[in-house]
Amino acid sequence: ELDGVALDTRTLLCEASTGALKKAGTKLNHGLFARYGLHASVPVIAQSLVENLEVSGLTADALSASLSASLESHLSGLSKINPAVEKLIKAAHQRGLPVAVLTSLPEELARATADRLGLTASNVRVFAFKDDETSGFPRADVWLKVAKAMGKSARFCVAVTSSQVSAKTALSSGMRCVVAPDSFTSFHDFGGADIVLESWDELSANELLDAVVRLVS
């Protein structure tokens, strides 16, 4: 995942939501965002927060526009790739393993972000898909499309995810799954995942790749 694994977009969206809702007279904290804001789609996040927190001083459309602007601004200049993921990508390429990132960001923004972060130059393929607001993102068929585009069978692919939804859909697609939860998703049930990292410091890039290669051998 580009969002949530390679990039810490959840913290940004939580902070931006907290600020916007505070101006509208509504309090939002980390726990409430973890409960209502863990969607891939910014409009869905905005709608969920406004409805569940019963916000009266701010519309969902206005909150969505504010969050989208904050996200685009951050990705255009301030965002940095997770150093552990950067090391993992480099180690994978040294072993001749192809790498791709999956995102629900608008394709133009996703590709511009990948270019700025050096992912494109590192031969990391970028796959941008629209979020399905009813069943969440990514769906199992999205993982399968990525595998097909990479010329691989899903059973020879390993998804690196950060949430319960993405882990379960990756497993449903036939992929193996490594989960690196963040502070918003650490309470999720990751039953069935092959590896769940308590932190990125738990294994070095090469140790994680050794474990990953055994999964698909």
Image: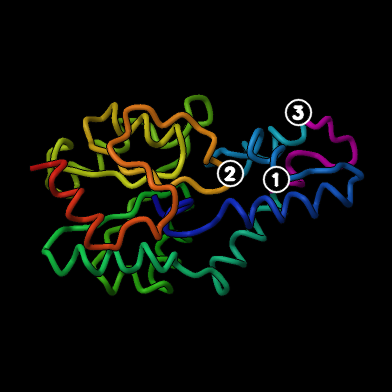
Nearest to N terminus: mark 1 or mark 3: 1
Q: Which residue is mark 1?
A: 30
Residue 121 on the magenta segment: no
- Whichever of labels 1 and 2 marks the residue nearer the N terminus, that label is 1
**Residue with the mark numbered 2:** 184
Residue 55 colored magenta?
yes
The residue drawn where x is 80% and y is 32% is 53
Amino acid at circle 2: Phe
Reading the image, the residue beneath label 3 is 52
Instruction: Give the residue type at disc 1.
Output: His
Which element carries disc 2, helix, strand or loop? loop
Asked whether, in this view, residue 190 is left or right of residue 148, the answer is right
- Which residue is at 82% across, 47% downward? 21
Image point 92% across, 44% down: which residue? 25
Q: Number of callouts in the render?
A: 3
Q: CA distance from mark 2 to mark 3?
A: 18 Å
Q: Is residue 22 left or right of residue 46?
A: right
Residue displayed at 53% across by 68% down: 79
Up-down: is 194 above or below 107?
Answer: above
Q: Nearer the viewer, mark 1 or mark 3?
A: 1
Q: Amino acid at mark 3?
A: Asn
Q: Magenta residues, as a range?
A: 53-64
Residue furthest front as drawn: 202
